Image (cartoon, grey):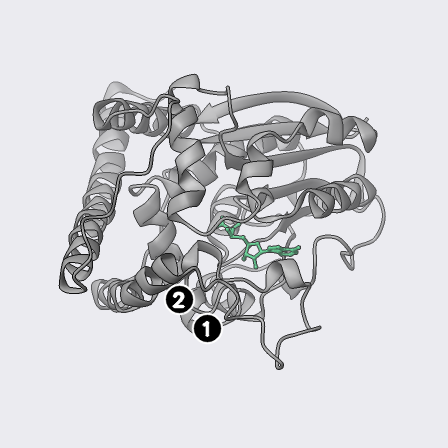
Amino acid sequence: MASPASRFATRIAYGARQLPRIAWYVGHGVVMRRLSETARRQAGASPRPRARTDAPVPDSRRLYADMATLFQQDLANVEAGIYPLPADHDGSLPFLLNRSRLFFEDLPEVHRRRESGELRQVLSEETRGKRPDYYLQNFHFQSGGWMTDESAKRYDTQVEVLFKGTANAIRRQALPPLHEVFAGRDQRRLRLLDLGCGTGRFLDFVKQAWPRLPALGIDMSEAYIAEAKRHLKPWCWLNLIVAKGEAMPVADESQDAVTSIFTFHELPPKVRRAVFREFARVLKPGGRLVLIDSLQFGDEPDYDGALELFPQNYHEPYYASYLREDFGAIARACGMTHRRDVNAFVSKVMVFDKP
Ligand SMILES: C[S@@+](CC[C@H](N)C(=O)[O-])C[C@H]1O[C@@H](n2cnc3c(N)ncnc32)[C@H](O)[C@@H]1O
């Protein structure tokens, strides 16, 4: 049991790390919206009409209250010893400023794509056939889709701006269900696979919690895997490979845990099912699957309108079908058991076991 003094020190350290991050990314969001309106005015366009929905949309008071709940949960996990005081490893100030510059530089292109609906700039003679067609799109309207080094360097800023600095705290909510199955076991003998690992931010937190756990990150983007290798360089017992989730080069029944963060809403329904079958194949009996992704309709009824509007503002071609996807049924069809869902701000943690 931690002493009151050490609990106080943990809380101060936690706040000192998280509050400037939130301010940084919320500030980026404010500047981004102002730039977007200025660009529209300069182009002679009328102010962007507010996207419409009849479903409820949370006001900023509710959003900030729910963000506070997420951070309280994150801190409670630290205080319960589930994971150490997290280090976000955002990089030095010059590094962050450079990432910020890349983010702002791409906004005019994002704006142009949003207005023109040009969403297939990644599908060219050069890329056709090298990746499935569903993958070769300008997801989030971003330049390069998932395919370029610049996109991989911008991604973390884009996601944190979208989530108001909560993306890492949301990712960490996959650690408690892993702790439930890892606690008391020799981490060196366990195996974890993270599919759609992107730039490796979640694997960083896995390693902070279990430094000697052998982990495998898989992603279909060479550029994102390269960025993950750079970010995760300090860690050992880590393998990062380019492959697709629907045909993973991983042995049957070899993994104790599989995770996938913010990836399932990017997949067409058929591919979601194929990837789930792969998860069931590679997990050992008794293995655990943890998914984190957006809330779905009805999870937090006050957010239903915001979920409906989201794909209108960001290019998310499979999000509408994701919102109604029945993950319990997909799991059952693969012989897996859906244990529970836990909401985490605008996302939720879904937990499944292989009997
Ligand atoms: C929204 S990003 C999520 C990245 C990361 N998990 C995170 O926490 O931010 C989706 C990632 O999934 C990858 N991806 C999409 N479809 C995939 C597939 N079928 N197989 C492997 N990776 C895929 C993309 O390349 C991208 O890096």
Pinpoint residue 228: horizontal percent, then vertical percent: 50, 62
Is residue 199 visible to the viewer in this orientation of the structure?
yes
x and y percent of residue 33 in the render? 21, 50
Q: Residues within 10 Å of mark 2 (few under 14, many from 20)?
A: some
Numbered label tally: 2
Pinpoint residue 253: horizontal percent, then vertical percent. Answer: 83, 43
The residue type indicated by label 2 comes to: Lys
Relative to residue 34, is residue 340 drawn left or right?
right
Quick one: SS at disc 2?
helix
What is the CA distance from the residue labelled 2 to the residue labelled 1?
6 Å
Q: Camera-side residue: 53 or 88?
A: 53
At 70% from the left and 33% from the top, the residue drawn is 288
Ligand 1 lies in which image quarter? bottom right
Q: Position of residue 200 (x, y in %)?
A: 50, 56
Asked if 319 appears above or below 217 in the picture, the reply is above
Residue 160 or residue 295, whichever sits in front: 295
Foreground of the two, 116 or 202 = 116
Q: Secondary structure at mark 1?
A: helix
Asked whether the residues under the numbered discs 2 and 1 touch, taking CB atoms below 8 Å apart as contact, a structural biologist would say yes
Reading the image, the residue beneath label 1 is: 149
Please report the residue visible at 74 percent of the width from the left and 26 percent of the height from the top.
329
Q: Inspect the image, locate mark 1, and give the three-letter code of the amino acid beneath it.
A: Asp
The correct choice, above or below, for 99 with respect to 302 in the image is: below
Quadrant in which the N terminus is drawn: top left
Q: Which residue matches tag 2? A: 153
Above or below, 331 against 232 in this view is above
